[in-house]
Amino acid sequence: MLDSLATPLRLALVAEDPLARGALSRALSDQGGEGLSLVAAGTLAELEAARTEPPDVVLWDVGLRLNGAEGRLEAPDLGAPVLALVPDEAAGELALTAGARGLLFRDAASGALMAALQAVARGLAVFEPTLSLVRAAPRAAASLNSPEALTPREREVLALLAEGLSNKAIADRLAISEHTAKFHVNAVLAKLGVQRRTEAVVRAARLGLVTL
């Protein structure tokens, strides 16, 4: 997290397509001025292999087509929060599952992109407002104000879901069985009125329960 608004943002840019990488680099350079420092740019494999000092934020262009088998994505693990640029809502859900902290469409204006990068670097959640998976859910809000609001343990589980952890990883972190972790995850989904883990995280962020 940055110490000051005056601190230049140290950015790592991950894009498999060299043309997209070049276009983004130029756009950010034109927009950023002294507020942005592009410290690394390359493919996911190149930057993970380099293992240099962690940046403040990672900009991840997932591309026009999903490269992972069976519709899976692997988010960059560079020690910093990730803002993903996605082509559509389906890719957005996969990017969230993979660990992205924010989503914008690939054609986002450079000004909006800079603002989103600054926000994500400071621990805030930023989502493309037209994505249906980030629209507030009245049923979720109502359930959280009812006697069946999340228990302290369920809030712990929700926070770990926001980190993108699997049921097994949640169980290990909380020193409980995987079966118990799955039970708590299902309870969180039910109380938030959703069916998917990604929806639970996004709705919880909209309701102020977690910070992505």
Image (cartoon, rainbow, N blue to C red):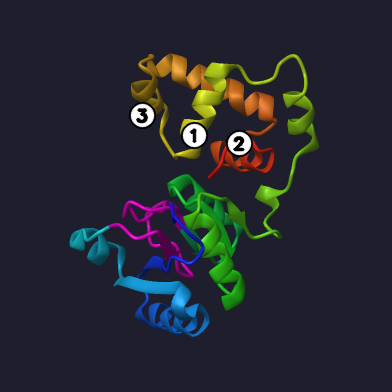
Q: Which residue does the image show at 56% across and 24% down from the upper left?
A: 155
Q: Which residue does the image show at 60% across and 36% down from the upper left?
A: 200
- Residue type beneath disc 3: Ala
Q: Secondary structure at mark 3?
A: helix
Quadrant for residue 52, please give it. bottom left
Quadrant for residue 17, please give it. bottom left
- Residue type beneath disc 2: Ala
Q: Is residue 200 magenta?
A: no
Q: What residue is shown with label 3?
A: 169
**Magenta-colored segment: predominant secondary structure:** loop
CB contact under 8 Å: marks 2 and 1: yes
In the image, is 90 to the left or to the right of 134? left
Above or below, comparing residue 14 to residue 27 in the picture: above
Q: Is residue 81 magenta?
A: yes
In the image, is 143 to the left or to the right of 66? right
In the image, is 151 to the left or to the right of 41? right
Depth check: give the residue in front, 186 or 42.
42
Q: What residue is shown with label 1?
A: 161
Q: What residue is shown with label 2?
A: 200
Numbered range of the magenta stretch = 54-82
CB contact under 8 Å: marks 3 and 1: no
Q: Position of residue 109 (x, y in %)?
A: 61, 76
In the image, is 113 to the left or to the right of 20? right
Mark 2–mark 1 distance (CA, rounded to whole Å): 8 Å
Q: Secondary structure at mark 1?
A: helix
- Residue type beneath disc 1: Leu
